[in-house]
Amino acid sequence: MIDELEALRAEALEAVSGAPAQAELRDLEVKYLGKKGALTAILKGMGKLSAEERPTVGALANQVREALKGAIEGRRADLEAAAIEALCADPHFDASLPGPSPSAGSLHPVTTITEHIEDVFRAMGFYLLDYPEVEDDAHNFEGLNIPADHPARDMQDTFWLQDGHLLRTHTSPGQIRAMAEFAPPFRAIFPGRVFRYERLDASHEHTFHQVEGIMIDRDISVANLIHSMKTLLGAIFEREVTIRLRPGFFPFVEPGFELDIQCQVCAGEGCSVCKGSGWVELLPCGLIHPNVLRYGGLDPEEWSGWAFGLGLSRLVMMKYQIEDIRHLMGGDLRFNAQFRAG
């Protein structure tokens, strides 16, 4: 094995010293020092050596490895210096010209809209809160008037964890946590990611974003809710948008409503985002159900409130006319570059 290592050292050093370019040098580094390289192949025979032989062979193997690393680094520096020298000798090269400008980063559109919404609600006196993405059944379902046998659970395919916890299916558990944390009257929003085991298409993702809002006070009415929603949408779109309010069933509000927005991708003509209807469900909302108030430790005879769950990902799609929700979590930097300021 000692002879094999010495032969490998001689062969590799000669090959490295004659490498004509960086690409060939990288190939040689992999050939001799890679996980499946020649040195590793030789060392696999260490198990066959006696206890007396192993220290000598191991020390030699380390010497060979260090010698090859040093030779590769030295040859790499020589090649880089030669490339710079060749560039300087080029009559068309002008060292006084500015180099390439560094590429500026950009905020993700979800981040941009989230910060905008936070600013709008802060101006209206709302707390900005953050709650766990991993929830328990009590906060995600039971406390929101969704018992174990409730059909609404079938509407939210859930990622369950082995310990009985789950990835929250909506930001609504924040309602229960906020009522336990703050004495009424108060108002708050809590944006964040939510997770549902859904089939992916142009308007559905397994990971998306919502913003939950809640206001607790005396004598809260639907008029208070509508005013706040119109203020929000007017601030986000910076113009008047067409909306409609229709009855909707959600266990944690009574009465409940669906606030739909005219599809901004197709201007209401019908497309894959709105499934040809011209409308996009954006903002389930309503007056908080008395059972939810009780679970949060409040007396529904004294306190009332409204709550909404804004589909933040869909709002971003409407704002920027994005035709497929999968772009938002796809990780393609070319998508983000479209939203770069300037």
Image (cartoon, grey):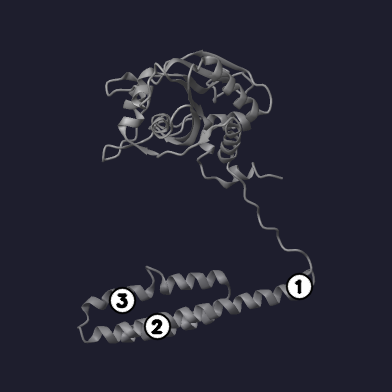
Residue 90 image label: 1
Inspect the image, locate mark 3, and give the three-letter code of the amino acid beneath it. Answer: Leu
Neighbours of disc 1 within 10 Å: few (<14), some (14-19), many (20+): few
Circles 2 and 1: CB distance less than 8 Å? no
Is residue 34 shown left or right of residue 42? right
Q: Residue 53 is drawn in which quadrant?
A: bottom left
Front-most of 236 and 275?
Answer: 236
**Residue of label 3:** 43
Residues under labels 3 and 1: Cα distance? 47 Å
Q: Residue at x 33, y 86 (%)?
A: 3
Q: Position of residue 140 (x, y in %)?
A: 35, 30
Q: Secondary structure at mark 1?
A: loop
Front-most of 164 and 142?
Answer: 142
Q: Nearer the viewer, mark 2 or mark 1?
A: 2
Front-most of 242 and 129?
Answer: 129
Q: Residue at x 46, y 21 (%)?
A: 305
Is residue 165 shown left or right of residue 48? right
Q: Residue 157 is drawn in which quadrant?
A: top left
Q: Residue at x 51, y 70 (%)?
A: 26
Residues under labels 3 and 2: Cα distance? 12 Å
Circles 3 and 1: CB distance less than 8 Å? no
Is residue 308 shown left or right of residue 113? left
Q: Earlier in the sequence, mark 3 or mark 1?
A: 3
Is residue 272 shown left or right of residue 85? left
Taking the image as drawn, is residue 78 in sight? Answer: yes
Inspect the image, locate mark 1, and give the three-letter code of the amino acid beneath it. Answer: Asp
**Residue of label 2:** 64
Total numbered badges shown on the rendered structure:
3
